[in-house]
Amino acid sequence: MPELPEVENARRLIADQALGRRIVAVDDADTFVCRPHSPGELRGALTGRMLTAARRRGKAMWCETSPVLDGASAPGPDLGIHLGMSGRIVVTSPDGWVAEGGDRPGRDAQPRKAEWDRFTLEFADGGWLALFDKRRLGRIVLNPDIDALGPDAAEVTPAQFRALITKGTIAVKARLLDQSKIAGVGNLLADEILWQAKLPPATPVSRLRRQDVDRLDRALRSVLAAATAEGGGAHTGDVIAARRPGGTCPRCGAEMRHGTVGGRSTWWCSREQAGPAAAGELLPEAAGRR
Ligand SMILES: [Zn+2]
């Protein structure tokens, strides 16, 4: 599932390859992906414009668009692109060279079928941009509402982070996943961040000490930096391969433990992240049998 690094990867692709190219046709016939827009509505809103900037906050991505006519003052609507569970952005150059960005080509990596392009912008130069989404869980929406999202996890300041993380008594992992507080951390990144910070995922945020919050902040920054680097991704974290029955901590060798925190499948080191038990925590033997 795309987390902040995968969306950033798609955003960079659009910023590098798709800006400043005149849109001459729009395929918005997939009324499910393009809901609530009716067929032709996106075409009418975008044809004749150019994408002028690719923006992201957390896992939300949108493109700004130009006026239809050069020199006109009013820009077009923002084009919101949500990658869903496994979506990718595909951009072709005028000579047909294909570039992709977004979720890693995991089990959906079969040869691209045209019918899995759920939304397409065709450029005047002969190239195009498509949302490739086999599972059809992505969304295209004009002027997406991002006001409900907290600051982007890669841009949150230490003071903001401290204030947003520590309010209330919720489990620290659930707080990390709350997109209205800090936007962009998904399940894999949260487990990696908590493991790097050596914090039990079910710790109530009210019990975090100042030094715990500082460690968590540093872990967030280093995990995001690694995950958004070339060849990165949420799945490339140090502890991710150990998130399985029988997995051992890559740092201390202790058994990994599994449970449900914040409603999500969670793995943590039984020695370095020992603490409040998680709801639905499995005994190691039970985990080993799964
Ligand atoms: Zn450990």
Image (tube, grey):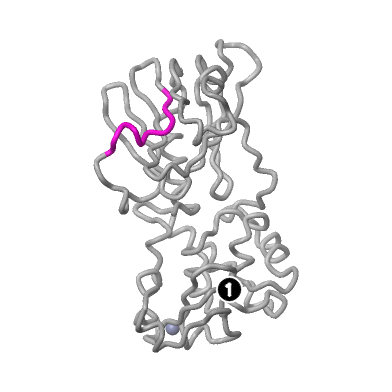
Image position of 43 with respect to 8: above or below: above
Q: Is-magenta flag for residue 117?
A: yes
Label 1: how many Cα within 10 Å (few below 14, some 14–19, many 20+): some
Image position of 3 with respect to 193: above or below: above
Instruction: Provide the residue span drawn in magenta.
Output: 112-121
The residue that appears at 47% across and 58% down in the rendered structure is 225
Q: Which amino acid does label 1 sit on?
A: Arg
Viewer-proximal residue, 264 or 62? 264
Q: Where is residue 268 in the image (x, y as percent from the top left)?
A: 48, 78
Q: Is-magenta flag for residue 33?
A: no
Quarter placement of the N terminus: bottom left
Quarter placement of the C terminus: bottom left
- Left or right of 96 in this view: 174: right
The outermost residue toward the right is: 168
The residue that appears at 37% across and 75% down in the rendered structure is 244
The outermost residue toward the left is: 111
Q: Quadrant of residue 61?
A: top right
Q: Where is residue 29 in the image (x, y as percent from the top left)?
A: 46, 26
Q: How many labels does the image show?
A: 1
Image position of 86 with respect to 53: above or below: below
The local secondary structure at tag 1 comes to helix
Q: Where is residue 111 in the image (x, y as percent from the top left)?
A: 24, 41
- Ligand number 1: quarter of image: bottom left
- Left or right of 76 in this view: 3: left
The residue that appears at 45% across and 21% down in the rendered structure is 26
The residue that appears at 39% across and 61% down in the rendered structure is 235
Image position of 218 with respect to 23: above or below: below
Viewer-proximal residue, 20 or 205? 205
Mark 1 and ligand 1: say if the CB distance to the nearest ligand atom is below 8 Å. Answer: no
Residue picked out by circle 1: 215
- Left or right of 169 in this view: 171: left
